[in-house]
Image (cartoon, rainbow, N blue to C red):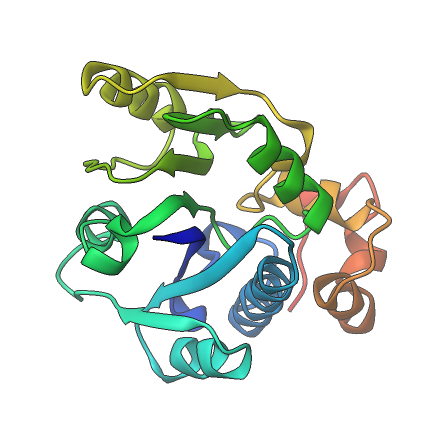
Amino acid sequence: MSGTLAILPVKAFDRAKSRLAPVLSAEMCENLARHMATDAVRILTGTSGIDRVLIVGQGREQAELASRFACEYASDEPALDISANLSRVVLKPDVQAAKQFLIVPADLPCLCSGDYARLLNRHEGGVTICSAARDRGTNAFLATSPMRMTFRFGSGSAARHARAARAAGFRTILVDDLGFRRDIDTPEDLQWLCRQEVSSDTATYLRASGIAALFAEPALCRGGVS
């Protein structure tokens, strides 16, 4: 049995971050998604305690990202949404053979290895779920294998997944962890991100593109960048 397997779903960059379209150009949405995913992979592959990283995606860039960081790669089924694809992926024998698996989104650019280490250390078997601050979605799902799960990501999914895990007989903890609270989906999230002092590819891009300077201003949501 292998150790901890991290599963990172990475949406096609040219279709990502559509909720930022009112304030960012299509090219900027694409670039932001690309940089956040790169940061996520770099941190995961550099975290002690995470033995394997599996990128789940669809497209040449996602496969190349996996190859660049020596990660495993699984293709999406185009007809399925992210929830159905992840429900399918966790049933794979090499996932079930891991001691535990962690599903985390690719749009948590302020996470560091210490955040992942803290989550792994507090996990005592069963299922540990980190909820998002804004919509109580699932920003981390850590499960001791083997387990089967039908996922339904989205608003309120942290509690929904916790109920499903408990109903299946798994010891389940739902936590509000500071590091995992804020994914980047809305203009308000982007404004928050631009005010953080972090060192990352994402932060470098935000500064170089001029987004950080504009979105640090209070009037952020009334305008945009083109």
Q: Is residue 198 left or right of residue 122?
A: right
Of 166 and 214, which appears nearest the observer?
166
Estimate the x, y position of residue 126 in percent, counting from the top left: 36, 25
Q: Residue at x 61, y 32 (%)?
A: 121
Residue 220, placed above or below residue 129: below
Observer able to see residue 101: yes
- Counting the numbered discs, the total is 0
Q: Name the residue: 68% across, 40% down.
A: 115
Q: Position of residue 71 (x, y in %)?
A: 46, 72
Seen at 46% across and 83% down, the residue is 67
Q: Residue furthest left?
A: 79
Identify whether 204 is placed above or below 3. below
Q: Residue furthest front?
A: 1
Is residue 112 visible in the rendered image? The answer is: no
Residue drawn at point x = 38 percent, y = 69 percent? 12
Name the image quarter holding the C terminus.
Answer: bottom right
* Image spot of residue 46 (x, y percent): 65, 62
Nearer to me, 157 or 164: 164
**Is 125 positioned to the left or the right of 224 in the image?**
left
Apparent side of residue 202 relative to residue 141 in the rendered image (left or right): right
Q: Position of residue 192 (x, y in %)?
A: 73, 40
> Between 132 and 69, which is closer to the camera in this rendering?
69
